[in-house]
Image (cartoon, rainbow, N blue to C red):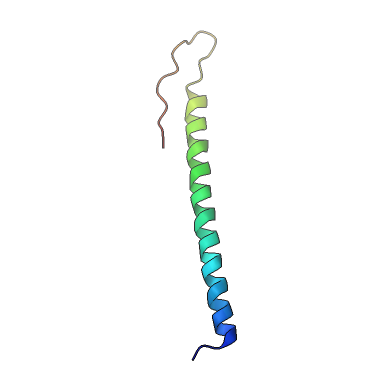
Amino acid sequence: MVTKEEFRLNIENRQLKKKLKHALAENEKLECEYRELAEFAQHWPGPQEKNLGEVTKC
């Protein structure tokens, strides 16, 4: 038999796992956007450059 406390902790644990999963997905998305921006900045044309080159998409 599961106690009320164990039941409550089980629900809380599932909610925290779900929050963690979403936070990790958001973190991965932000890291990807940051890498794209950094790569784009590396290819930014100087005063005499005209071609941007290719930027990798995540």
Q: Nearer the viewer, residue 31 or 25?
A: 25
Please report the residue visible at 45 percent of the width from the left and 17 percent of the height from the top: 52
Q: Nearer the viewer, residue 48 or 27?
A: 27
Please report the residue visible at 58 percent of the width from the left and 79 percent of the height from the top: 8
Q: Kindly give the residue lying farthest to the top in the view shown.
A: 48
Residue 14, position as x, y percentages in the image: 51, 69
Residue 20, position as x, y percentages in the image: 53, 60
- Relative to 12, is 27 above or below? above
Please report the residue visible at 55 percent of the width from the left and 67 percent of the height from the top: 15
- Relative to 16, is 1 above or below? below
Q: Nearer the viewer, residue 21 or 43?
A: 21
Q: Nearer the viewer, residue 27 or 41?
A: 27
Q: How many marks?
A: 0
**Based on the displayed image, in which of its 4 quarters is residue 23 positioned?**
bottom right
Please report the residue visible at 42 percent of the width from the left and 27 percent of the height from the top: 55
**Based on the displayed image, in which of its 4 quarters is residue 57 positioned?**
top left
Residue 32, position as x, y percentages in the image: 47, 40
- Relative to 23, is 17 above or below? below
Quadrant in which the C terminus appears: top left
Residue 38, position as x, y percentages in the image: 51, 31
